Amino acid sequence: MSVSGLTGSPLRCCLRLPDRNQGLVCRQVSAISSAGKPKEKNGLLHLESCSWAVSIRKWKTQKTLLIKCAMDASYGDMASESAGSAIFPRINIRDPYKRLGISREASEDEIQAARNFLISKYGGHKPSVDAIEAAHDKIIMQKFYERKNPKIDIKKKVREVKQSRVVQAVTSRFQTPATKFIVKTSIAFIVLGVLTVLFPTEEGPTLQVALSLIATFYFIHDRLKSNIRALLYGAGAFIFSWLVGTFLMVSVIPPIPILKGLRSFEVLTSLITYVLLWVSSTYLK
């Protein structure tokens, strides 16, 4: 006869209990031997029931610990994945160039390289990826619009002119002297210009032009302390200034109504020459 883990027979009964090491263990109790001793029989049954309760309690404790360990391992993996996905620090910056960390003059290759680098670094965080992609797309569309509708960048053109070899070679031949020397040369050539405008002669401003040449020699010698360089620089500056002034009056500058007369052409040419001679006398190395 077998009932709920108990196997009975006329002579003995078998009680199957869970054991920590060997699974179920059959504990046998003789019915005949204990038939005449009711007190011993009751004590033996009580001992068997206590062993059963302790074994079940240990089994439940082990099962709870296994479930807890499994949950801790699962949540630990999730935490490590969350920690591995870094957040893009410039995610809230509105300027797309600053968000990608590039300049506005960056080429398309530099823009693409910045985008790929940031995606590889913050690819585990979806909002960061969306912010990076949005900035990249906005810059690309802006570059495309600028190619379709080009405009003149004055600052860029000026920078390109300053960086050209010709301009750098010319500017390297000039230097800024002391302020006192600049004031002295400026007063001298301004006086010559006023005399040329106020007292034009029939022969033209010949005297004033001669005085401007002498002033050029004097100022260059005073600054460079060399007679030969003063002679060469002064003569070259005078010839160059007069040719440039004549070219500008003939081809570029229209007639000025304020200056009328037979010698207005010579007067304006002399004024342009004075300006160029002042630059040569003051700043030429």
Image: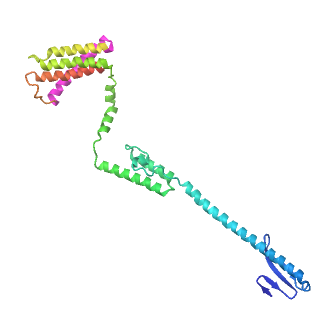
| Residue farthest to the top, as pictured | 227
Q: Is residue 26 visible?
A: no
Give whichever of 271, 184 is nearer the camera. 184
Rendered image quadrant of residue 279: top left
Q: Is residue 62 left or right of residue 181?
A: right
Q: Is residue 14 above or below residue 241?
A: below
Q: Quadrant of the C terminus?
A: top left
Question: x, y percentage for residue 87?
Answer: 50, 53
Q: Is residue 45 left or right of residue 184?
A: right
Q: Is residue 240 magenta?
A: yes
The residue at 44%/56% (across/down) is: 130
The residue at 21%/15% (across/down) is: 213
| Residue farthest to the front, as pictured | 39
Q: Quadrant of the N terminus?
A: bottom right
Number of numbered discs present? 0
Rendered image quadrant of residue 262: top left
Give whichever of 160, 261 is nearer the camera. 261
Question: x, y percentage for residue 148?
Answer: 29, 50
What is the magenta range?
223-252
The residue at 72%/68% (across/down) is: 61
Question: x, y percentage for residue 54?
Answer: 78, 72
